[in-house]
């Protein structure tokens, strides 16, 4: 092996980075967060070697190499080492202090030191980057659900974190921290939803409305009741199990035909329903058409499901699809929720793909005001509730108090839901009681 100058240079940078990572891994596990923050500021803001000269020398080596890319990578990974450990140890309140240090007024001061000048210029560039904005997601929902940024999209931070934990170029610490926080947010939402709906049902006859700990609007009970009373959602899990049991011997082409029947575009407006089916049919049957005569398998099911999720949400170019706009703006958003839920129930492993598409959708619409995005927000709220009810750890049951005899047919199993969009929300939430319990299977 020939040791070229470039290779020796690369080895030196990697060794310096490793020293810095190991240092912060050690201090974050053995020191109080306040002390860790002092170490971080001393190194990355002050470039001081008073307390840890060998670590300062390691950073000095990166600065001397004048490698901006490696500096950003080093800084980012160190931040996620701290964020990840503080998330695990329930010390997330210190993440905001970390962000404040990075944006410290010192980095804008002039200096005679060439290295310090380089460091400060790079820090100024860093705080304008998407990486720095990504840090702020970890400060949302800290204990009191306080929003540091008032953009409506921050309500859905658990989705936006998908950019970090799904991205293979993210460091291990970043993926772990993002995934852990996203899971905590989902679990907290599910818990809050279960507790709030239980209290609402209990206090439905009372004038006092219980505190709403969810990010949903106060008509949450109506949304949950709608989800639980609409048969096309109520039967989703059993329909998915039945569908998977019926396709085992089918060819890929026959699977596609059965899949369209399973999705069941029984939208109230026949013209819209027809438009959706036509729009979807051609693209679906072009997908992997060379394998039409092959037996269906898990890989083809996943590939097809991911394709349809893309068609129902946002394109690879970051623009909402035509089908998304049709289903969102020309029908009740619950129809779109049903389609996505049916696809998810075919295989849970497509959930990261779904979450990433929803994250991309949120990012696209976040440039617009909350007023202009009411339909999108309603859709995501409904999707969150549907996932909590049918893919979460809590089992929900709904009981209609004193049901009218002529509506008894509603309790029968059916192949679809033919209720019109204008009728599915025509119910009095006070007529229902919602009961929840931990799902054990």
Image (spheres, rainbow, N blue to C red):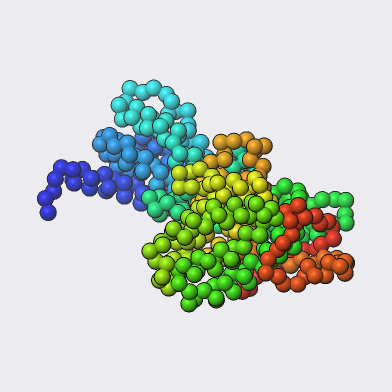
Q: Residue at x 72, y 53 (%)?
A: 421
Closer to the camera in the image, 168 or 43: 168
Q: Residue at x 45, y 68 (%)?
A: 252
**Quarter containing the C terminus:** bottom right
The answer to whether 220 appears left or right of 152 in the picture is right
**Quarter containing the N terminus:** bottom left
Q: Residue at x 44, y 28 (%)?
A: 106
Residue 430 in the image: x percent, y percent?
Answer: 84, 57
Residue 366 in the image: x percent, y percent?
Answer: 57, 39
Residue 110 in the image: x percent, y percent?
Answer: 39, 22
The extreme left residue here reads 2
Q: Residue at x 70, y 70 (%)?
A: 414
Q: Is residue 363 above or below residue 228?
A: above
The answer to whether 363 appears left or right of 47 in the picture is right
Residue 153 picture quarter? top right
Confirm whether residue 87 shows in the render.
no
Q: How many marks?
A: 0
Closer to the camera in the image, 190 or 245: 245
The answer to whether 427 appears left or right of 244 in the picture is right
Residue 112 in the image: x percent, y percent?
Answer: 33, 22
Q: Is residue 345 above or below residue 68?
A: below
The answer to whether 328 appears left or right of 6 in the picture is right
Confirm whether residue 230 shows in the render.
yes
């Amino acid at each position: 092996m020939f040791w070229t100058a470039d290779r020796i240079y690369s080895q030196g940078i990697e060794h310096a980075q490793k020293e810095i990572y190991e240092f912060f891994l050690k201090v974050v596990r053995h020191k109080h967060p306040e002390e860790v923050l002092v170490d971080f500021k001393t190194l990355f803001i002050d470039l001081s070697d008073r307390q840890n000269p060998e670590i300062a020398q390691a950073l000095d080596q990166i600065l001397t190499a004048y490698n901006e890319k490696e500096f950003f990578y080093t800084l980012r990974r160190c931040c996620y080492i701290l964020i990840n450990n503080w998330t695990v140890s329930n010390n997330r309140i210190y993440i905001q202090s970390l962000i404040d240090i990075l944006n410290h007024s010192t980095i804008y001061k002039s200096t005679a030191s060439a290295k310090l000048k380089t460091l400060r210029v790079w820090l100024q560039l860093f705080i304008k980057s998407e990486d720095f904005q990504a840090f702020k997601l970890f400060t949302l929902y800290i204990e009191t659900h306080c929003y540091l940024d008032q953009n409506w999209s921050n309500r859905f931070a658990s989705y936006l974190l998908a950019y970090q934990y799904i991205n293979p170029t993210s460091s291990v610490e970043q993926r772990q921290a993002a995934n852990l926080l996203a899971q905590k947010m989902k679990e907290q939402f599910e818990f809050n939803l279960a507790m709030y709906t239980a209290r609402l049902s209990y206090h439905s006859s009372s004038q006092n409305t219980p505190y709403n700990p969810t990010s949903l609007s106060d008509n949450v009970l109506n949304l949950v009741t709608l989800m639980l009373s609409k048969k096309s959602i109520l039967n989703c899990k059993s329909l998915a199990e039945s569908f998977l049991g019926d396709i085992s011997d089918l060819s890929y082409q026959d699977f596609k035909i059965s899949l369209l029947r399973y999705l069941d575009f029984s939208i109230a407006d026949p013209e819209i329903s027809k438009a959706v089916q036509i729009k979807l049919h051609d693209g679906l049957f072009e997908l992997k058409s060379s394998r039409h005569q092959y037996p269906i398998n898990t890989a083809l099911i996943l590939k097809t499901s991911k394709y349809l999720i893309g068609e129902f949400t946002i394109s690879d170019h970051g623009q909402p699809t035509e089908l998304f706009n049709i289903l969102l703006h020309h029908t009740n958003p619950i129809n779109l929720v049903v389609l996505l839920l049916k696809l998810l129930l075919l295989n849970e492993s497509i959930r990261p793909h779904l979450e990433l598409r929803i994250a991309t959708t949120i990012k696209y619409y976040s440039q617009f005001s909350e007023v202009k995005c009411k339909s999108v927000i309603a859709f995501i709220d409904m999707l969150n509730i549907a996932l909590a009810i049918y893919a979460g750890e809590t089992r929900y049951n709904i009981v209609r108090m004193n049901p009218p005899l002529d509506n008894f047919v509603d309790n029968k199993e059916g192949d679809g839901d033919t209720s019109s969009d204008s009728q599915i929300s025509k119910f009095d939430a006070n007529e229902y009681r919602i009961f929840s319990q931990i799902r054990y299977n």
